[in-house]
Amino acid sequence: MPRLPAKKLLVALLVLACLGSLLLAYSWFESRYLRPFDERAAFFSGAALRLPPELAARESIRLVHFWDPACPCNVGNQQHLAELIERYAGRVEFHVVQKPGSHGRLPDELSALHPLKALPGSEGLPASPAVAIWDRDGRLAYFGPYSEGLVCNSSNSFIEPVLDALIAGRPVNAGNTLAVGCFCDWGDSD
């Protein structure tokens, strides 16, 4: 049997060690950062949602972001939300409601969100992240997820078309939505 030269054997072992290290690193990354996608549908009904009196009196478009600090689905959503804030600054008021009883802080790039202690009707929220948008007359124009599917960005978002229509003065009535996406339960899990 011919013998491999020591140099070739060393290179082959080094390549195998690198491949093994890459496989271990990928496995670690996948288990830590990639979550299984739960394809459950969530029905968002905005029938009970109301603006607090201090917001209802304003004649502006109002967006309320619902978030749970412990939800891994926020990661992709927060980048999209930062882009929305930048794109619609001065034309839309941005607010946030944090899941009751949760603890956490939004990233600095979302500091333009005005926190609300509560929003009447939000206790029945099925899942988060979610968004509610009211038109200039205080009517609920949209309530539901930012998009459908595993990730959220401007290419698959429901939000930009709604905001663009409201800014142009066109009515939108999408207060109830059914979507499949990356969601976390809003209510108690007891």
Image (spheres, rainbow, N blue to C red):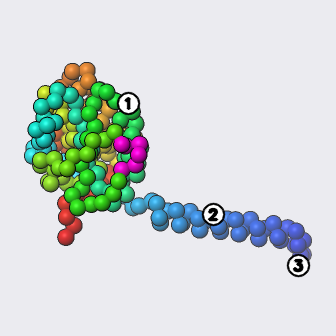
Separation of disc 2 and disc 3 at Cα?
A: 32 Å
Give the residue type that dot 2 points to: Leu
Separation of disc 1 and disc 2 at Cα?
A: 39 Å
The residue at which mark 1 appears reads as 87
Location of the N terminus by quadrant is bottom right
Quick check: marks 3 and 1 in contact, CB under 8 Å?
Answer: no
Q: Position of residue 184 (x, y in %)?
A: 28, 58
Which dot marks residue 1? 3
Give the residue type that dot 1 points to: Arg
The residue carrying pointer 1 sits among few (fewer than 14), some (14 to 19) or many (20 or more) residues within 10 Å by Cα, namely: few
Image point (47%, 66%), residue name: 31
The residue carrying pointer 2 sits among few (fewer than 14), some (14 to 19) or many (20 or more) residues within 10 Å by Cα, namely: few
Please report whichever mark, 1 or 2, sits nearer to the chain's N-terminal start: 2
Res. 105 visible in picture: yes
Q: Position of residue 66 (x, y in %)?
A: 25, 48
Quadrant for residue 126, please give it.
bottom left
Which dot marks residue 22? 2
Which span of residues is magenta-colored?
106-111
Quadrant for residue 23, please give it.
bottom right
Res. 39 visible in picture: no
Q: Position of residue 173 (x, y in %)?
A: 16, 33
Which dot marks residue 182? none
Picture layout, residue 69 above or below residue 133? below
Relative depth, front residue between 110 and 65: 110
Quick check: marks 2 and 3 in contact, CB under 8 Å?
Answer: no
Image point (19%, 70%), residue name: 190
Determine the residue located farthest toward the bottom in the rendered image: 1
Please report whichever mark, 2 or 3, sits nearer to the chain's N-terminal start: 3
Q: Secondary structure at mark 3?
A: loop
> Which one is closest to the eye, mark 1 or mark 2?
1
Q: Does residue 175 show up magenta in the picture?
A: no
